[in-house]
Amino acid sequence: MQIALYENAAVALLTAPGQVTSSIEGLRRSGFAASRLSVAGAACRNRREVAACYDRGGRPKCWADAGAFWGGLWETLDGWGFFAFPDIGPVLVAGPLSGWIVTILENSSIFDGLSALGAALYSIGVAGDQIFRYEAALKSGKILLLAHGSADEVTRAGQILRSIPATIS
């Protein structure tokens, strides 16, 4: 697990859904609010598979190689979205990051040279030179976990994330 701290966000680069679940549980057990957590990952690792997300009876559903994982996240974290970004591909998002992306899209506030995802990350303080690295990581199948808040909360989130075993698959 790679963890970077920025002024308003801690970003963890993870490789498996189990790492995400354990990290979220660890953060929540330590008192970190779920409303301050977001997750983004590739909609499908196998480009030959269908990825679909829809609302069924007021509950979000996902049909993809990790559909159960995403469905669980969408029930735990506030907000969700399915986005297809040029040069990145289809990305699923859970948590406030989905709303930040929508805000960027609705306001046409695309920062010069950044995708809507990159602009949303930049807007919460992720360093511009790291955004392309995170987008490449998503494209390669990695998962981003963001914990956002005040500088103290971000520092605490980083400490909690560093204490979670990275070997969970």
Image: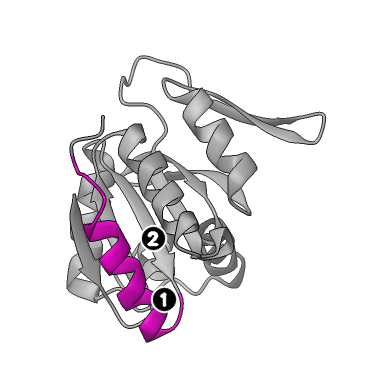
- The x and y percentages for residue 101 are 51, 61
- Specify the segment rendered in magenta: 149-166
- Of residues 162 and 122, the one nearer the viewer is 162
Toward which corner of the image does residue 157 lie, by quadrant? bottom left
- The x and y percentages for residue 51 are 49, 24
Q: Which of marks 1 and 2 is nearer the N terminus?
A: 1
Local SS, label 2: strand
Query: Which residue is rendered at x = 40% and y = 15% of the image?
Result: 49
Q: What residue type is labelled 1?
A: Ile
Q: In this view, does 59 lie to the left or right of 52?
A: right
Q: Is residue 8 left or right of residue 34?
A: left
Relative vertical location of residue 142 with respect to residue 13 in this rendering, above or below: above
**Which residue matches tag 2?**
146
Query: Which residue is rendered at x = 21% and y = 49% of the image?
Result: 136
Query: Which residue is rendered at x = 37% and y = 84% of the image?
Result: 152
Residue 138 counted in the magenta span: no
Q: In this view, does 15 lie to the left or right of 102?
A: left
| Residues marked 1 and 2 touching at CB (< 8 Å) | yes
Local SS, label 1: loop
**Which residue matches tag 1?**
124
Q: What residue type is labelled 2?
A: Leu
